[in-house]
Image (spheres, rainbow, N blue to C red):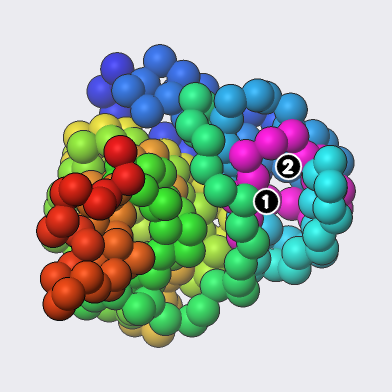
Amino acid sequence: MNKLAYTEFEFANGLLYDYSDNDYPTRLHAWTEDCSFKEEGSTFYGYVFEGPTEITTANNRYQLLARQYFCMKDGFALSGGRGIVIERVGFRGMDSLGGPVEDWGRLKYIDGCTDSLLVPPVKLGDPCLNALFFPENIDQTAHTHPSMRVGMVIEGSGSCVTPEAEYDLIPGKIFIIHPDGTHRFRTRAGAKLTVVAYHPDSDFGPKDEDHPMINRTIVDGVSAAKIEDIRTV
């Protein structure tokens, strides 16, 4: 396993990093020219850094602008613009489109920072795509993550501090935080920072026995989640 906490990449067309031997096999791609993705058995999480970008699938065609994002589970082609695509190998997600990314986070995080789930986990353990928002004058508490993170700076400026070095972050910077890599983010006076971040796994999400539909189905005053005899096997 890579012993460094942080790796950054040039914004170049094609495969940037292959984490296929990871517990959560993931490949990081970027596009700066027309390209296609045809890998069967993968789900692709993408962010449009500069648009417009046209996504063409077997059944539909979509046009996305800058600050929009997507999740695609089957083959598709990208035309125009540039951005990143994170491929979760061996996982079948749910197609979705969204955005633009808002200017603030809907969930409280740490040290004054906030977060929004852009593509939430469909079920417990699934990957997710987030937006992280760092106000100005943040010096975050040093921390680690149990699995890798892919990040892309979409607005503002700041830095990522690791035991090895301090790395400047500007719009378009693409990076990976490796598993258990110690790091923290900093911003300066007058400069906020917004990062799109991919998590390959999640300890949050619905389960077969715990989700809004079954929880809020009431039989004689009792939630169906508590009645094993009628739950779908």
**What residue is rendered at 61% in x and 71% in y?**
99
- Disc 2 is placed on an element classified as strand
Observer-nearest of 61 and 3 = 61
Query: Where 204 falls versus 9 (above or below)?
Result: below
Q: Is residue 81 magenta?
A: yes
- Residues in magenta? 69-83
Q: Is residue 232 above or below residue 48?
A: above
How far from the left and from the top, in percent, is residue 21?
Answer: 40, 15
Look at mark 2 in the image and give the residue it sits on: 31
Q: Nearer the viewer, residue 189 or 50?
A: 50
The quadrant of the rendering that contains the N terminus is top left
**181, above or below 139, in the image:** above
In the rendered image, which quarter is residue 181 located in?
top left
Name the residue: 81% across, 59% down: 62
On the image, the x and y values in percent for residue 232 come to 32, 45
Name the residue rendered at 62%, 39% in the picture.
73
- Report the front residue among 172 and 203: 203
Contact? badges 2 and 1 (CB < 8 Å): yes
Query: Amino acid type of disc 1?
Result: Gly
Q: Quadrant of residue 36?
A: top right
The secondary structure that dominates the magenta segment is: strand
Residue underneath mark 1: 83
